[in-house]
Amino acid sequence: MLRSFARRGGIVLAALMLPVALIGSASAATPSAKQLSSATLNADGSTFQLAFNQVVIGAFKPVQKSVTINYQGNGSGQGRTDFTNKVVDWAGTDAVYAAAAAPTEPFFYFPTVTAPITLSYNVSGVNALKLSPDTAAKIFSTAITTWDDPAIAADNPKVKLPSTKITVVHRTDGSGTTQNFTHWLQLAAPSDWTLGSAATVQWPASTQGGSGNSGVANLVKTTNGAIGYVDFSDAKASGLKFAAVKNSSGKYIVPNLVSAQEAVNGATVNADLTFDPINASGAKAYPITSPTWIIAYQNQSTAAKGQALKAFLNFIYSDGQKLASSVDFARLPAGMLKQAKAQVSKLVIPAS
């Protein structure tokens, strides 16, 4: 139930659809929570974090009945733009601003969860696949066009590969998932990846595009020979197969929450709580592990909105972490969680 609901774009039915056990556990954990004044927080951005946002917003509603939080997954790029233009109260992003594009007013990056970006594929008869960075770069740049290519065969010597044409599927919207995936290709396969790294990439004309992680997942699922980069939650919810990917230690690692946590543990956390687990060191680290953040202004616009946001962030850093695995996200490491909680107290909220 959680995963099928998590694909929806809106959030209106979150509290109704959330399993009673999860709502109950969240409510019971904060029985004496002070009820806040009525407030509505509107947000958009990352589809990577959409499933987690939906479940945690749904669980937060019974704790603060007068607070309404609306989140739309329009992609990290759109989220950052809307946040800069103050169209939304906060935004979700899987990538940090370029220095020249960042808002001029003080704001915070609040990490929430982490998860793998999978290389999901649909190749009839192939149920296990390994991909090295160089091979993945050649596939996604269309230098490799069939599944029985010698480079793929070299990564998979025991797999019978068909001559099926490869269909590359990518995001069409401004996407943190795209930015992190292409960042990995730049780092791990610099000689074979020449398309750059950004929220949008100039993909070859022979490729196909989908909107949001769920759009890519659906195209992969319905196209024999397809491969695409899809967040772990959407890939699992869609029943997709995904490849083990060769990491910086030379090990082929299956994407899961444990291997994602290994990657995060190997990343350096900056003072502003940004960090980069892509291609992290560690024999057990999954190399395409994505961070994701809520971005919020330090100086809140009203007392009601500021108190609502503060309560929501504190909920994410307490009961919300317990809900992460229910929609296939990894919790934050203890040290980062402590830093994030401390940062919440730095929000400046008007007295009235």
Image (cartoon, grey):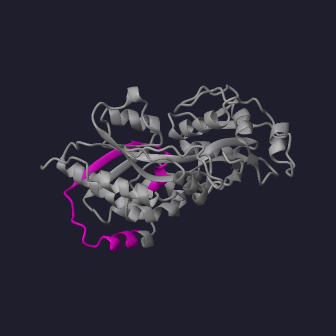
Q: Foreground residue, 281 or 150?
A: 281
Q: Foreground residue, 71 or 148?
A: 148
Asked if the magenta segment contains residue 260, the reply would be: no
Asked if the magenta segment contains residue 25, the reply would be: yes
195 displayed left or right of 212 = right
Residue drawn where x is 77% and y is 54% of the image: 128
**In this rendering, does residue 107 appear at all?**
yes
Q: Foreground residue, 294 or 87?
A: 294
What x and y, as percent, mark residue 243?
A: 71, 50
Does 285 appear above or below 35?
A: above
Image: magenta residue range = 23-52
What x and y, as percent, mark residue 292?
A: 46, 47
What x and y, as percent, mark residue 266?
A: 54, 51
**In this rendering, does residue 15 appear at all?**
no
Residue drawn where x is 42% and y is 58% of the image: 335
Does 314 appear above or below 289?
A: below
Q: Foreground residue, 339 or 122?
A: 339
119 displayed left or right of 311 = right
Residue drawn where x is 68% and y is 31% of the image: 207
Residue drawn where x is 18% and y is 49% of the image: 303
